[in-house]
């Protein structure tokens, strides 16, 4: 998975790519959330390694 984050007013352009593709977790039975978390690599106007957590609800279930 990958994401692009842009903040033009600050001249920031980031390409954030997951290091492991299989990091989505379905916790609908316990916390009613589906989320993605994992290590990421950042390239663009800034570079580095990090950890990202994304939470979202899937209303289709």
Image (cartoon, rainbow, N blue to C red):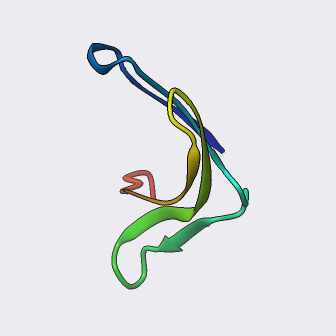
The quarter of the picture where residue 10 lies is top left
Give percent across and percent down for residue 23: 63, 65
Q: Is residue 61 left or right of residue 3?
A: left
Give the x, y percent position of residue 33.
38, 68
Q: Going by the picture, which residue comes out furthest to the left?
A: 9
Which quarter shows the C terminus?
bottom left
Q: Nearer the viewer, residue 58 or 17?
A: 17
Q: Residue furthest bottom?
A: 30
> Does 47 appear above or below 53?
above
Where is residue 14 drawn, in percent x and y? 51, 31
Quarter of the image with the N terminus in it: top right
Taking the spot 26% from the left edge, 14% from the top edge, the residue there is 9
Taking 22 as reference, is 7 left or right?
left
Q: Is residue 49 left or right of residue 56?
A: right
- Vertical order, 3 against 8 (above or below): below
Question: Looking at the image, which residue is at 45% across and 64% down?
Answer: 34
Residue at the image position 51 percent from the left and 26 percent from the top: 45
Q: Residue at x 42, y 74 (%)?
A: 28
For residue 2, which quarter of the picture?
top right
Q: Nearer the viewer, residue 14 or 53?
A: 14
Quadrant of the image occupied by residue 55: bottom left
């Amino acid at each position: 998975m990958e994401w692009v984050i842009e903040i033009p007013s600050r001249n920031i352009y980031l390409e954030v790519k997951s290091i492991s593709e299989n990091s989505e977790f379905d916790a609908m039975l316990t916390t009613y959330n589906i989320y993605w978390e994992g290590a990421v690599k950042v390239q663009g106007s800034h570079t580095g390694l990090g950890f990202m957590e994304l939470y979202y609800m899937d209303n289709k279930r």
